[in-house]
Amino acid sequence: MTRDPAPTMLARATLTDALEVLRALQDPTRLQLLGAVVGRAALPHSCSLAEAALRTGLPVRTVLETAGRMRDSGLLRLDGTTLTADPTVVDRAAEAVAAALPIAPALAATPGLARWFRRGRLVRVPDRWADQAELAAALVTLLPGGRDLAEGEVNRLLVDVGDPATLRRLLVDHRLVTRDAALVYRRADPVRPG
């Protein structure tokens, strides 16, 4: 029995790893093969090449070639004639993408904010003023300081996190951003004790 030499994905995936997983999943035949291997109720998610061919209706040679293309992503491993799937690779890829989102550093610095977010997107503005203030303090870090920003610029910086209009209003309400009559926004200067 030969051991598949492909390296397994690290406990934490990088964006490059996530890209590799997405590329592996973009082909319908690869998705079909992964489904055939993962579709087993028992763990580990393994089956023989012949069993995968039977489940997918693909020739064994095509299953082998497709598995080879998926190997580098870590989704499938071939050990002799046994295919083993690791669906947690998809979870790690999603975590890598979420960690690269603009709001990720603020969420890491203020873990209590995570309850308002799903996959880097704000799902709900908190009702309590104190929670809103904490959220606004995290959001303002997405905006550059010391310069005027047109509304469109602010929107582009906030859109990946949530509804820009809602987030702009939150920042203005909490006086972390000023807005003039011409819809020019600017980060407010922090109040210095003293």
Image (spheres, helix red, strand yellow):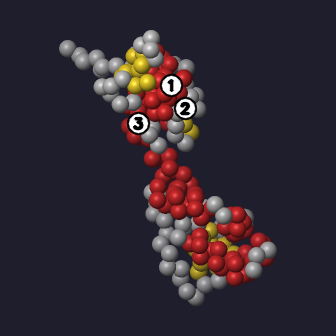
User: Which of labels 3 and 1 is toward the front?
Assistant: 1
Please name the residue that numbered disc 1 is placed on: 167
How far across and how far down the image is residue 83, in percent?
64, 76
Disc number placed over residue 127 in the picture, else none: none
Is the C-beta separation of discs 2 and 3 under 8 Å? no
Is the C-beta separation of discs 1 and 2 under 8 Å? yes
Residue at 72% in and 66% down: 32
Front residue of this view, candidates 28 and 96: 28
Name the element at disc 3.
helix
Tell me which corner region of the image, top left, top right, bottom left or bottom right, holds residue 67: bottom right
Disc number placed over residue 106 in the picture, else none: 3
The amino acid at mark 3 is: Ala
Residue 83 against residue 170 in the figure, above or below = below
Please name the residue that numbered disc 2 is placed on: 162
Tell me which corner region of the image, top left, top right, bottom left or bottom right, holds residue 36: bottom right
Residue 84 against residue 18 in the figure, above or below = below
Report the residue that reaches farthest toward the left.
Answer: 194
How far across and how far down the image is residue 117, in percent?
54, 35
